[in-house]
Image: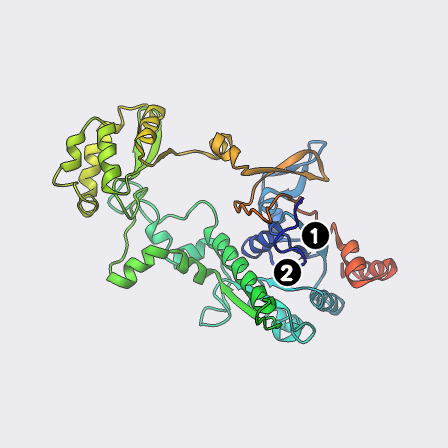
Amino acid sequence: MTKGALAGVRVLDLSRILAGPWAAQMLADLGAEVIKVERPGKGDDSRQFGPPFLMDREGKVTRESTFFISANRGKKSITCDISTPDGQALIRSLAAHCDVLLENYKVGDLKRYGLDYESLKLVNSRLIYCSITGFGQTGPYSPRPGYDSIFQAMGGLMSVTGNGDDVPGGGPMKTGPSLADILCGQYAASAIIAALYHRDATQGGSGEGQYIDLALLDAMIAATSHYASQYLVSGQIPIRRGTEGNGGMPSRMFRCADRDIMIVAGNNEQYARMCNVLGHPELASDPRFSEIALRVKNRRALGEVFEPLIVEWQSDELLAALDAAGVPAGPINNLEQVFADPHVQARAMCVEVAHPLTDEAVRMVANPVKMSGTPIDSYGAPPMLGQHTDDVLRDLLSMSQSDIDILREKKVL
């Protein structure tokens, strides 16, 4: 097992649900020690986000939800009631021994407990403190709570996702996965790593920590990428195009005789090769479709021409022919088909980890990052609630078992 790129970095994870835990899991995958702080008796809210839940070795339902499992592997879990003075003192002591603190409490909540950045940097000036909230620490919406679908709506993603209003079933659509949370978590992880580099760089590192303010709404707006650029540069509001792409054409879902597939002819050469595969090379020089800009302009007519040609094919035969011709195309897989795909298996995108509640390994999505010098080659199971409380307090804070027992009797742990 190789030491991870972030070996030696310790993270105190006070976050819940998805954006913060996702960022902390990324850091754990990269080798950081992540200590997850949870509420005694209940834990992270996402532990209850089910069914489905993990089944134990006796076939009984556990409290380990698949949602929680997706974002908390490789962490240590401790319980601490931060609303109590003893709990607050405990967090301050832990923060003094950590490089990073992640939290996603409502704006101002942790300041009431003396656990805000200004308070904690007094006990650890090297601390990187990352706050993730729905709307950020400033602005008129900053006090508001929110969830992923709210930010997909307000940040513009839903306005460009789904079929157009002129198509049956058209209208704004939320993406399946919680992309605002996931993307914000990725922004958080990269910002934290940059702050660590700023603090510790061999040449000119400041030695000082800093505060990171991340908003899910901001992250969602940034992730609209070229759609936002289209509006900001041209003043044109992007429309919903269903499965159609925003570049070369055709770029959309087509129905074959047996199932749907995606085809993207991203340039004129690929488009000409696609026409050849379909047995209609004359369509490459059709005056309506001979250039990318013309195909974009005449996208509706393009679909009407190619739909009846493609529906005659069996999907596997057409995909093989397009692949041989160098035209990007692929099946629309469900998740069972995704993980059965030989290429996905060759890329080791499913990993198995041992879990204390079951004899069978728990399957998880692997981290997609492939690093040559510090590969991500080891994964720990998502922790059970409070699984590591005694170990962390004893090893990191040198607390005696009797002191730990007293805190537990006082319901601090």
> Which quarter of the figure has residue 401?
bottom right
> Which quadrant of the figure contains the C terminus?
bottom right
Residue 341 shows in the view: no
The residue under label 2 is 14
Closer to the camera, 231 or 249? 249
Closer to the camera, 2 or 48? 2
Task: Say few, some or many: other residues with alpha carbon within 10 Å of mark 2 (under 14 / 14 to 19 / 20 or more).
Answer: many
Q: Position of residue 29 (x, y in %)?
A: 61, 49
Q: Position of residue 196 (x, y in %)?
A: 59, 64
Residue kind at label 1, given as amino acid type: Lys
Q: Are marks 2 and 1 in contact (CB under 8 Å)?
A: no
Count of number-bearing discs: 2
Q: Position of residue 284 (x, y in %)?
A: 17, 36
The colour scheme of the drawn protein is rainbow
Residue 216 shows in the view: yes
Q: Earlier in the sequence, mark 2 or mark 1?
A: 2
How far apart are labels 2 and 1 at the CA level? Answer: 12 Å
Residue furthest to the front: 203
Residue at 52% across, 59% down: 190
Residue furthest to the left: 287
Q: Is residue 319 above or below residue 164?
A: above
Residue furthest to the right: 402
- Secondary element type, mark 2: loop
Q: Position of residue 1 (x, y in %)?
A: 67, 44
Q: Which dot, 2 or 1, sits closer to the camera?
A: 1
Q: Is residue 53 left or right of residue 403?
A: left
Q: Which mark is residue 112?
A: none
- Secondary element type, mark 1: strand
Task: Say few, some or many: other residues with alpha carbon within 10 Å of mark 1 (under 14 / 14 to 19 / 20 or more).
Answer: many
Residue at 77% across, 60% down: 396
Residue kind at label 2, given as amino acid type: Leu
Q: Which mark is residue 76?
A: 1
